Image: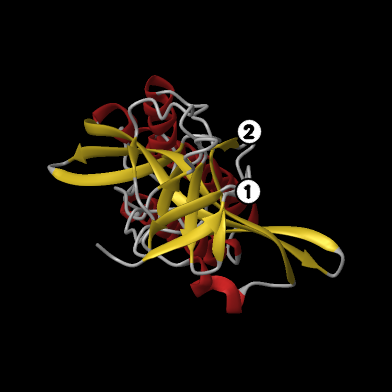
Amino acid sequence: MGNLASIKCPKCAAPVTFDAETKFVKCSYCSSQVFIDRSGAGFYYAAPFMVDETNAVGMFRRWAAGSTKAKDLDRLAQIAGVKKKYFPVYMFKRDVNGKEQVVLEPAGSTTLPGLHSLKVPATDLKIFDGSFDIGGAELIKPDIEMTSYNDQLPGKPKEQALVFFPIWKLDYVFNQKRYEVVIDGSAGEVFSAEFPTRSSGAYMAVAGLGFVAFIAEGLLAAVSLPLALVLMGVTVVGVFVTALYVARRM
């Protein structure tokens, strides 16, 4: 058993006794969940899921249909798993030259893409207490101290809290290789560190042929300008049609 310590509950001010190694404790008077950090005690919050699993998969498919993604990735990607999670972030409200600025920083170590780019949830935050329903989501525990960010934050502190952020982790397989994306369960934004890309070889070939044709037509203009202009017009149309075909087929 570690050394016992005591704090005041941020909600009802009742004394809360806890083990010194504990990060989370429940107030025995008002049942509030309290997060304990070296910087003190405070509420912690959660943003409810606004995106369900079906919509998350649909958002992934639309993202996968983007012009930079491999051809037919949206159709051919095989979903290997979808997991519902709550990821911890610290929310710092700071006074910067008289204006409030909100900064989010990860509270948990992660290699998942996009979790350093989360934005303040559009929905209202809920106090994370015994009545909050996590809906079967995995709750990722924080393992980064809040104080590790203090020296790099702008302005003066106004408020700080731990927020559990809703995310969907989606794994998929394409061409026998496994990839993962994170979908913001609040706003629906898709994050990916690596994804199958569309080959640029065909585009480069079209551009190269068009360039060579224009050079040849430029030389021809010295002999017959009208003929060169006609051929240049044909080349422009040909390059456009070929590029369109490549965009749709390649």
Above-or-below relation of 222 to 70 = below
Above-or-below relation of 121 to 95 = above
Secondary element at tag 2? loop
Most extreme residue toward the top is 54
Between disc 2 and disc 1, the foreground one is: 1
Question: In the image, residue 155 lies at what x, y percent?
Answer: 74, 72
Which residue does the image show at 12% across and 42% down from the upper left? 176
The amino acid type, in three-letter code, at marker 1 is Ala
Question: In the image, residue 187 lies at what x, y percent?
Answer: 56, 35
Q: Nearer the viewer, residue 65 or 49?
A: 49
Above-or-below relation of 86 to 153 = above
Above-or-below relation of 26 to 211 = above
Find disc 1 in the rendering and name its residue. Answer: 13
The amino acid type, in three-letter code, at marker 2 is Thr
Question: In the image, residue 10 lies at what x, y percent?
Answer: 61, 49
Q: Is residue 25 left or right of residue 90?
A: left
Q: Nearer the viewer, residue 223 or 54?
A: 54
Most extreme residue toward the right is 98
Which residue does the image show at 31% across and 50% down from the upper left? 199
Which residue does the image show at 29% across and 26% down from the upper left? 75
User: Mark 2 or 1 closer to N-term?
Assistant: 1
Q: Say whether residue 209 is visible.
A: no
Q: Nearer the viewer, residue 169 or 197?
A: 169
Mark 1 Cα-neighbour bin, 10 Å: few <14, some 14–19, many ≥20: few
Q: Say whether residue 33 is visible.
A: yes
Question: In the image, residue 23 lies at what x, y percent?
Answer: 40, 57
Q: Which mark is residue 123?
A: 2
